[in-house]
Image (tube, rainbow, N blue to C red):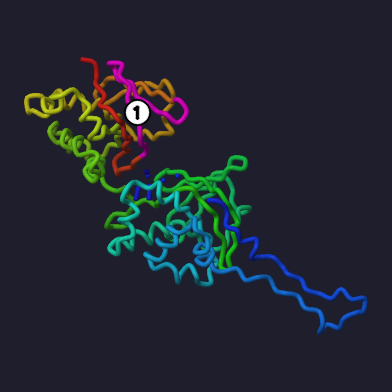
């Protein structure tokens, strides 16, 4: 969110082999002199960058570190603790996000995200505690969650990732593996924290919401949804609008139907920032329109049922904006006439 607000789905590195001691000695019955006894020193473990580069599951991470010019830093004395996303974690980012971050003009942004995964000092798994707030090299905070054997990290955008392997040691620190990319809160020109634009800005920056943005504009709701909020928007995609009966959308976009269009759009808006974790099965959510949406949860599947009894699927959640949050849906909700 995926909450960059590189918002966000490896096994442990096989370094044990590098730590094996090979003892060489004499089996003879005669006592050997000190000069005859030799012991092979432990194989030297490389730096954090070396360890990551030696594991194909970290290919994307190493490429990102290289693009951000952080290779020398993370090969320095340290010590550092790195929460290392796998290739699959980077693949789970929204389409195009990683490619954009790897562009030279986005090096500073990429470096900020990567250093948000780094903590000064060597923090072993045993040093972590539930609720602990860990300050990163980037300056932002990660919050540790521990429930039995499960260890998680929650970033400043409230996105949570799992720590899947721990205590992979390097000569200048330690690596813990995570299954998602954590992202710090963005900063505005004055340096204060903010998410990446208003709900309208976020929608306008995503080509899957072109029809929604056109409808919001036609209904004169841009200023409202760019206000302080906070708002929660259940945002239909272009395909969702295209699935309406032929001619419906064209008719709704006519100036004489602005009030009807506004009523439909505000039926997709809830006051307050309602995150996915706040939803529960059977929950009735009152919209800005005044009508009710009913939440359905069955395992990982989350749905909304409108006043007409039609059900749509929530296909993506917790896309944060400076004035609220967006959840993506695959259909258009209609209030009762």
Residue at figure coordinates x 56%, y 69% from the top left = 46
Q: Nearer the viewer, residue 68 or 330?
A: 330
Tell me residue 326's x, y (percent): 31, 37
> Is residue 248 toward the left or the right of residue 92 in the image?
left
Q: Secondary structure at mark 1?
A: strand
- Residue 159 picture location, percent across and down: 43, 44
Give the residue number, with chain letter if any, for mark 1.
Answer: 313
Left/right of residue 286 with respect to residue 251 in the rendered view: right
**Label 1 neighbour load within 10 Å: few <14, some 14-19, many 20+:** some
Q: Nearer the viewer, residue 162 or 16?
A: 16
Q: Could you tell me which quadrant the N terminus lies in? A: top left
Main secondary structure found in the magenta portion: strand
Q: How many marks?
A: 1
Q: Is residue 264 left or right of residue 117?
A: left
The residue sitting at 25% across, 34% down in the picture is 237
Q: Which residues are magenta?
A: 298-318
Image quarter hosting the C terminus: top left
Name the residue at the front extreme: 28
Confirm whether the magenta stretch covers residue 236. Answer: no
Question: Furthest residue to the right?
Answer: 29
């Amino acid at each position: 969110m995926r909450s960059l607000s590189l918002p966000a789905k490896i096994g442990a590195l096989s370094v044990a082999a590098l730590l094996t001691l090979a003892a060489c000695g004499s089996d003879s019955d005669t006592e050997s002199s000190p000069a005859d006894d030799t012991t092979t020193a432990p194989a030297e473990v490389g730096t954090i960058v070396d360890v990551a580069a030696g594991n194909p599951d970290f290919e994307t991470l190493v490429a990102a570190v290289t693009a951000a010019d952080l290779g020398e830093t993370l090969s320095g004395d340290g010590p550092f603790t790195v929460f290392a996303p796998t290739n699959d974690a980077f693949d789970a980012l929204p389409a195009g996000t990683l490619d954009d971050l790897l562009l030279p003009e986005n090096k500073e942004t990429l470096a900020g995200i990567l250093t948000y995964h780094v903590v000064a000092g060597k923090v072993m798994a045993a040093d972590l505690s539930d609720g602990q707030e860990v300050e990163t090299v980037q300056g932002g905070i990660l919050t540790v969650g521990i429930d039995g054997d499960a260890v998680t990290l929650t970033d400043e955008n409230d996105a949570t990732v799992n720590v899947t392997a721990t205590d992979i040691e390097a000569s200048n620190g330690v690596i813990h593996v995570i299954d998602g990319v954590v992202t710090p809160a963005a900063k505005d020109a004055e340096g204060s924290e903010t998410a990446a634009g208003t709900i309208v800005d976020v929608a306008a920056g995503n080509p899957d919401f072109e029809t929604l943005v056109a409808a919001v504009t036609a209904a004169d709701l841009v200023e409202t949804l760019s206000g302080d909020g906070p708002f929660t928007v259940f945002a239909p995609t272009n395909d969702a609008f295209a699935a309406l009966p032929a001619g419906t959308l064209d008719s709704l976009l006519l100036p004489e139907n602005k009030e009807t269009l506004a009523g439909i759009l505000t039926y997709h808006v809830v006051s307050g920032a309602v995150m996915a974790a706040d939803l529960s099965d059977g929950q009735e959510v009152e919209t800005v329109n005044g009508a009710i949406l009913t939440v359905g949860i069955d395992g990982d599947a989350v749905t909304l049922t409108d006043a007409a009894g039609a059900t749509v699927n929530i296909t993506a959640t917790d896309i944060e904006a400076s004035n609220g949050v967006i959840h993506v849906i695959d259909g258009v909700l209609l209030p009762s006439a």
